Amino acid sequence: CGIFGIIGHPEASNLAYLGLHALQHRGQESAGIVSSNGDALRFHREMGLVADIFTAPTLEKLVGSAAIGHVRYSTAGGSQLKNAQPLCVEYADGQMSVAHNGNLVNAQELRQQLVAEGAIFQSDADTEIIIHLIARSRQPTFEKKVTEALSKVKGAFSLLFLTHNQLVAVRDPYGFRPLVLGRLRNSYVLASETTALDLIEAEFIREIEAGEMVVIDEQGLRTSQPFAPTRLGRCIFEQVYFAKPDSVLFGMSVYEARKELGRQLAREQPAAGADLVIAVPDSGVPAAIGFSQVSGIPYDVGLIRSHYVGRTFIEPQQSIRHFGVKLKLSAVRQVLKGKRVVVVDDSIVRGTTSRKIVKMLKAAGALEVHLRISSPPTAWPCYYGIDTPSRQELIASSHTTEEIARYVTADSLGYLSQEGLGAAVGDRERNTFCTACFSGKYLTGDLTAQAASPQH
Ligand code: 5GP
Ligand code: SF4
Ligand code: MG
């Protein structure tokens, strides 16, 4: 998911709209904006894309100088309007709204507990638990209620809260999901990625730190570190795939990081004798360029991506996903014919896309197809806000690299090592990133058994 917030600007909801537009790659199922005019909150949420949902008349109704917004792709909870965010509720102290990126790992037990105590839930999203915990808190101020509520939840949360007069931003102590702070004249801006700041011409100030809470209201900006500190667990897959390449994420350019992944991949898994390097667009492009730089094999464009379809993986239905590959990519025969081709992609999840791509390249005349992946085998599901399928569906959980190569019908297959991944993102010691989907090391406690069980 993607989140955006702004306070202190007369056109808050218009800027939230633009910010969400820049974050659209983080979720395409639904979008919403809540605004505050200092008195009351107003909201609009719908299924679909930001540009389709928010018309000028809709935005005009979202009055006020503060707003938060959300773009969603389902990780916890189904793809339905009731799960769209920001959530907006009335409770004892007035109105509050919340936009959440991440997943809680103790949602089930907290929810059962709350339901047993009489709570009524309107969505399946884990975010609603946070709302209930805040509403029940007996602490005197909103920020103390939020702190108390969040001390009970475990997992990944980059959160924005909007009340009638405060914008609160919080990032979990591991820092799984990104969140940055910026400034636009007299207003403060918060966003999942810097690309949203760039679009509205806001100045990047800094990241919200892992475990930090920032409260912005008429008194200005206050910061605190309300949670017990822990090691960092920033999502390495944001650098590999999820974030937009023009963003600066965790202090590093995403584009540069991906290029470096490709360079490292070329060192570890060369493809001597190949004629050209191509990318699976868009996510594989920077890594393919890096691969070409180190290997000396020329880079060319052998696959064209249609701009009229979204990220296939994010479409939740299997039927759409299957059709999606062909809709999305087409091969350039003139480039591929008679060539030994290295094709670089960021990851293999189920293997179905890769298999279709390899077949497509061969059908377009490629003599050999050598598949290179700029991350290690994805063998474990993510419980922290990326929608990987169950362990059973992850091809690398039960197949060797040779078996996967055979399945996708590639002449060779090479993955980046876990060491190489760490080195490429500047984490040689491998202790500031979460790598659980590659390593099975879940930082919030051992979810390995849960991941291996058939229900997950
Ligand atoms: P597969 O070959 O496993 O069917 O698909 C791999 C492709 O899915 C890659 O091109 C990768 O960029 C894309 N992809 C899209 N969304 C995701 C996601 O959320 N997680 C992962 N691991 N890959 C994704
Ligand atoms: Fe990111 Fe993978 Fe960790 Fe999930 S498990 S937070 S995708 S690195
Ligand atoms: Mg891709």
Image (tube, grey):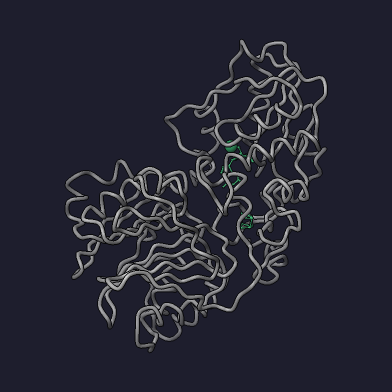
Location of the C terminus by quadrant is bottom right
Q: Nearer the viewer, residue 210 or 437?
A: 210
Q: Quadrant of ligand 1?
A: top right
Q: Nearer the viewer, residue 451 or 275?
A: 275
Tell me the quarter of the picture where residue 124 sits. bottom left
* Residue 234 sits above or below residue 145 on the image: above
User: Does any portion of residue 277 appear in the rendered image?
Assistant: yes
Tell me the quarter of the picture where residue 272 sits. top right
Question: Left or right: 143 with respect to 151?
Answer: left
Say which residue appears at 68% left-offset and 39% top-offset.
Answer: 260
Say which residue appears at 28% left-offset and 83% top-offset.
Answer: 92
Say which residue appears at 76% left-offset and 58% top-offset.
Answer: 429
* Residue 189 sits above or below residue 421 on the image: below
Residue 452 point in image, percent of width and height: 72, 61
Question: Left or right: 315 with respect to 284?
Answer: left
Residue 214 point in image, percent of width and height: 42, 69
Residue 354 point in image, percent of width and height: 66, 34
* Residue 125 sits above or below residue 287 on the image: below
Residue 202 point in image, percent of width and height: 37, 49
Say which residue appears at 51% left-offset and 29% top-offset.
Answer: 328
Counting the numbered discs, the total is: 0
Q: Nearer the viewer, residue 31 or 353?
A: 31
Question: Left or right: 195 with respect to 290?
Answer: left
User: Does any portion of residue 122 appear in the rendered image?
Assistant: no
